[in-house]
Amino acid sequence: VLIKASEQHLCKAPVGDKSKEDSDGQVVDDEYRRCRTQQFDDLPIPAKTVDFLRKRVMSLINCSETNLEVTQITKYSSGDFFAAHEDGFAPCYRRHAEAQAPGKNSNRIATVIVYLSEVQRGGETRFTQTQPVTDVAPREGKAVVFFPARLPSATTDPGGLAADVEHEARPVM
């Protein structure tokens, strides 16, 4: 259902300040991220489906709706990838995080990736800083949960980046 509903609406995926745009403001392929994505709010998906998914995530990571970002779907076709990155905001982007939730020392504290399909080869989510490096193969229905930032209530560097969560989407073959 989600894949069919999104197929005609996916756009080239931007990446913060690393995205490149053409003269018409359209995101162009670059060497950092190549895939297509769209926010659920902009898709013809029944509200009950979106609500169900978001409630499952809230239950999984024990948070409220106000702690969730916009839900999105991303499609990686043959050759698509996302270079190594962290989902939390590095200190140089702390002002951006603060603007998202003023006064809350906000950061992305959880990432949930749900694979909607399988590929023949490639497409792994690779955690590049774990020892040993950890690859998670895309399998339909599998979810990967990790925590890219410390909680705002942490005693050391509240809201700061967590260790060992840099990851990448390996090229789909």
Image (cartoon, grey):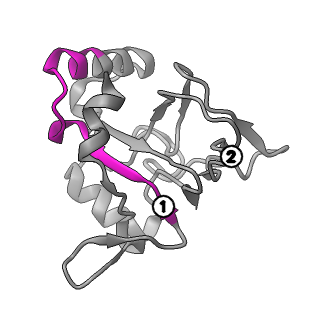
Residue under circle 2? 127
The x, y position of residue 88, in whole percent, is 46, 52
Residue 85 in sight: no
Q: Secondary structure at mark 2?
A: strand
The x, y position of residue 137, in whole percent, is 68, 33
* Magenta stretch bounds: 33-52
**Closer to us: 51 or 5:** 5
- Name the residue located 61 percent from the left edge and 25 percent from the top edge: 139
23 vs 68: above or below: below
**Closer to us: 71 or 46:** 46
Q: Amino acid at mark 1?
A: Arg
Q: Amino acid at mark 2?
A: Phe
Residue 79 in sight: yes
Left or right, 24 with reference to 153: left
Q: Earlier in the sequence, mark 1 or mark 2?
A: 1
Residue under circle 1? 34
Q: Secondary structure at mark 1?
A: strand
Left or right, 88 with reference to 84: left
Near mark 2 (Cα within 10 A), the count class, few <14, some 14-19 or many ≥20, is: many
- Name the residue located 53 percent from the left edge and 54 percent from the top edge: 86
The x, y position of residue 166, in whole percent, is 62, 52
96 vs 62: above or below: below
**Closer to us: 59 or 28:** 28
Residue 24: which quarter of the image?
Answer: bottom left
Near mark 1 (Cα within 10 A), the count class, few <14, some 14-19 or many ≥20, is: many
Left or right, 41 with reference to 53: left
- Name the residue located 38 percent from the left edge and 52 percent from the top edge: 36
Q: Nearer the viewer, mark 1 or mark 2?
A: 1
The x, y position of residue 170, in whole percent, is 65, 51
